[in-house]
Amino acid sequence: MTYAEKKYEAPDISAPLAYNAENFLRAAGIGKTKLHEEINAGRLKALKVGRRLIITHDDAKAWLNSLPARHASKKEVA
């Protein structure tokens, strides 16, 4: 297949490649203290780019999937 025959495929932009801290906090529904607790405990991977904290989409998903499931108590079911 030649270059001219290849079809252009648009990148998947449905999810960001990475989140800054503010956007991650909003998306995850947690606060700054919890964010730093998770990073310092090694449960959430984060990168520093200059002064900014960056969390990749894959690391955000991995952290979310690692959280324990919450089961409904008998009071909540009734």
Image: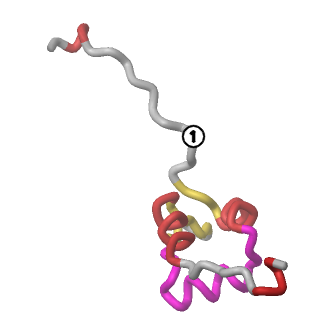
Q: Amino acid at mark 1?
A: Ser
The scheme the figure's colours follow is secondary structure
Residue 41 shown in magenta: yes
Image location of residue 32, percent across then percent down: 74, 79
* Magenta segment includes 40: yes
Q: Is residue 1 left or right of residue 35?
A: left
- For the record, the magenta segment spans 29-46
Q: How many marks?
A: 1
In percent of the image, x 33 and y 15: which residue is there?
7
**Neighbour tally class for label 1: few under 14, some 14-19, many 20 plus, Cα within 10 Å:** few
- 72, above or below 23, in the image: below
Q: Residue visible at 68% across and 67% down?
A: 28
The residue singled out by tag 1 in the image is 14
- Side of 8 relative to 46 (left or right): left
Q: Where 18 falls versus 45 (above or below)? A: above
Q: Is residue 37 left or right of residue 8?
A: right
| Above or below, comparing residue 32 to residue 50 in the picture | below
Q: Position of residue 61 (x, y in %)?
A: 52, 64
